[in-house]
Amino acid sequence: MKSISLVSLAFWSALGSCAAYTGRTEPEPVSHRFNRRQAVSPSSGNDTAPDNDYVMGALPGGQGKSTIDKLLAQHADGADIATLLNPPHAGKVPDPPNAAPRRQPLTPRIEFWHPNSKTVKLRYGPYNVPNMTETGNFGGHGGMLYNYPDLNIDKPCDDCRIVGVNADLEYADGSSANVTNGMWLHHYVHFVVGEGRTDATCGGEEVSLPHKIIGETPRNAERFFSSGNEKTLAAFYGASRIAGYRLREEDQMAVIVDFMNENMEDKVVYLTVTYDYVEGDPEGYADVRPIWFDIVKCGTSELPSPRDSDSFEITSPPWTPDFDAEIIGFGGHLHDGGTSVIVSVDGRSIGVSNASYTEYTVAVPDHDPNRGETGHGHGSNQTTHLSGMSPIIGTDLIERELAKGQKWEIKATYDYGLYEPERGMDGALENIMGIAIMFVIPDT
Ligand SMILES: [Cu+2]
């Protein structure tokens, strides 16, 4: 059970079609820095990836897109593309024998804020994640289950209000699948699909690529939650009103999962999502709405990393709400090398979600970086990875009001001099992300 102090708030992000890039310091070439630090191979790959048209400086729409976003934009069937990106045996498989139960009631953990709330862990999948030696049909990375859609997953409850949520990764027997044994929750995106579920930041767009992957539109599906290795718990408390995310019987849930495997064999893992909820619609509860901010507007959040600077900031396209609300809180998502996500309104910061890092002791059987693996940044001796993003909630918030007509944006900051970025086995920089998920209570 997580301690109360870990309970955080949620984050969500929106998207923007033209991220603005602001270069900062450039003390010396990236490859030199990494040579000196002896943490990753000084491979030349990072300047030569052919599918990368990232352009430094301002990024007009259509430039600097990741390969998956380009593919998704070109093809009608997003789920088809996402499936094609993975090897044929990657993805959902049947439950192995003796697998732990898919639904596990836990001791309620946030009754302090939500009297009568229940806590339940659901296990999704399982998913087969290809081993390090096996590349998908895209990008040349091994050891990935890449942006894989899973539609119509189990819900924690049918008529209820969700008041807390967090995610993790497990093996069939319920043991933890994590960085130390070569499995990563790289990220997952959690949707609620149903009438009226308009995505706050992409609902006005004709096409939103993550929605396309699950075969929906941003007008009937909203991105409700997301998590990577930071595994932040989003719990709804600290506002002037008690509030929860209303889930109705007719709503469905879907996820896109993205896992990494640095083992030499395939691994079968479950995505676990632990929900706190109150049954029905108790009197006094206000609605919660997620707002997904993203440096990549309405894309899969993946942005090719800048290559000529190891310290940079990327600002999202602005978003203007068409409703008023009270802010509950937010949390960020970054990849390795990231240091913070700032959410701001009309140029004023309302808070900073800071990254924290852990030096992991990695014990992966048979792992041998010299065996021609093609995996996802795991061939190096890099063992320090992003492991937390501070939640900004309640009194952490500098401002707590969201109003029509304001200009909202986020800024993601990376410093590869402080923390090693993710690299492929060829040394090429992996895509980065900058997301903040904010939860608000709309005025009624
Ligand atoms: Cu990510």
Image (cartoon, helix red, strand yellow):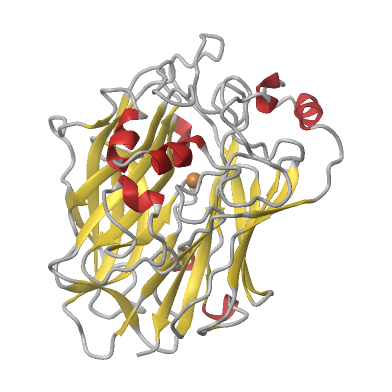
Name the quadrant containing residue 111.
bottom left
Residue at 41 percent of width and 29 percent of height:
144
User: Does residue 295 sit above or below 344 in this rendering?
Assistant: above
Quarter of the image that includes the N terminus: bottom left
Furthest-top residue in view?
371
Rendered position, 167 above or below 284: above
Residue 170 appears in the figure: yes
Picture quadrant where residue 378 is located: top right
Viewer-nearest residue: 150 or 283: 150
Residue 334 point in image, percent of width and height: 56, 50
Residue occupying the point 76% across, 37% down = 308
> What residue is shown at x 50% (from left), y 68% (from top)?
330
The quarter of the picture where the C terminus appears is bottom left
Locate residue 402, reporting x and y percent: 52, 82
- The location of residue 387, given as percent across then percent down, is 54, 47
Numbered label tally: 0
Percent position of residue 240, x then y: 44, 89
Residue at (47% x, 63% y) in the render: 6
Residue nearer the viewer, 120 or 311: 311
Q: Residue 395 versus residue 48: which sits nearer the camera?
A: 48
* Horizontal relation, residue 338 to residue 122: left or right: right
Depth check: give the residue in front, 271 or 429: 429
